[in-house]
Amino acid sequence: MASRESVDGAPAADDYRRLTAHLPEPVFVPLSGYTRLPEAEMLARAEAFHDAMQRRRTTRHFSSEPVPSRLIELAMRTAGTAPSGAHRQPWRFVAIDDPALKRELREAAEAEELKTYAERLTDEWREALHPLGTDHIKAHMTDAPWLVVLFAEKYGLRSDGSHRKNYYVDESVSIAAGLFIAAIHQMGLVTLTHTPSPMGFLRERLGRGVNEKPVLVLPVGYPHPEARVPDIARLAPEAFIQWNAPERPTGPSST
Ligand code: IYR
């Protein structure tokens, strides 16, 4: 077909083809590993997964009982199945079980958090947090057998030092974090999404590159036998789910 430009000067599909002509053809393979399930089984699985996830709670009270590293590895590998912008996979996980390192990180986090709680939080923020019972004491950082620190690779570094752009980094890393949390819950452990603020000390102490930004500290372990959780409820489904669009206004149009 002849090259066309639309009448209003908008770019035509041919432009994209011309701009990508020098690039190798994308390689596609069959979608293997997908199994179509009978609808009854889909429903049963969906109900079971939903029920399991509804039982997930964030607790700050961890047992110090050890957890095999293989379980932590599987959660990180599950997180690594997340979709990502341009398939850049910009998540990096650091798993820590060295007690001395955990203690060091806890001290650094608490020093920052003391300033945060005493000076940096606005009154509104402090009031919002108060029901969750958080404070600058971060016992979970030494109680939990594992601390998993999630970093976002803001950009790639080529061997010549130049930057390779990543895309939708925050979204991609957040999706990976969600999968990690689901995996931990599904295997019968608990975790907490801790955001020490500011987090620069993590990048430095853990020897990560300047192109990486710490995003979350995720202590992982068994709940303490006397673990408690705040008395809070999830939104009702109607409060966060909409089906299709509202009816368009009817009646005479203004034009
Ligand atoms: N970074 C602090 C404060 C904090 C902020 C929010 I928003 C929370 O939901 C919980 C804590 C901390 O980690 O304690």
Image (cartoon, rainbow, N blue to C red):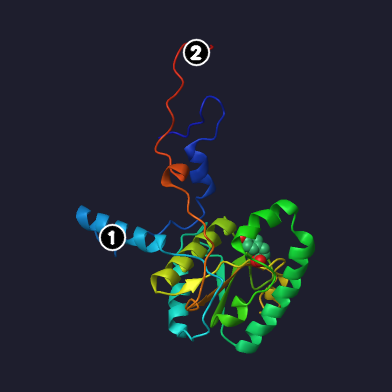
Which numbered disc, 2 or 1, marks the residue closer to the eye? 1
Residue 204 to residue 248: above or below: below
Which tag, 2 or 1, sits closer to the chain's start?
Answer: 1
Identified at 70% across, 66% down, the residue is: 197
Amino acid type at circle 2 is: Ser
| Neighbourhood count class around disc 2 (C-alpha, 10 Å): few under 14, some 14–19, many 20 upward | few
The number of callouts visible is 2
Image coordinates of residue 163 in percent, x first then y, are 66, 64
What residue would you read off at disc 1?
45
Q: Are the residues at dot 2 and dot 1 in contact (C-beta closer than 8 Å)?
A: no
Picture disc at residue 200:
none
User: Which of the pair 5/173 is nearer the observer?
Assistant: 173
Give me the C-alpha separation between circle 2 and circle 1: 47 Å
Examine the rendering and report whether any part of residue 163 can be seen: no
Image coordinates of residue 17 in percent, x first then y, are 48, 45
Q: Quadrant of ligand 1?
A: bottom right
Image coordinates of residue 2 in percent, x first then y, are 44, 33
Amino acid type at circle 1 is: Arg
Image coordinates of residue 124 in percent, x first then y, are 71, 51
Identified at 43% across, 56% down, the residue is: 25
Residue 236 to residue 248: above or below: below
The reply to whether the residue tagged 1 has its Cβ within 8 angstroms of ligand 1 is no
Picture disc at residue 253:
2
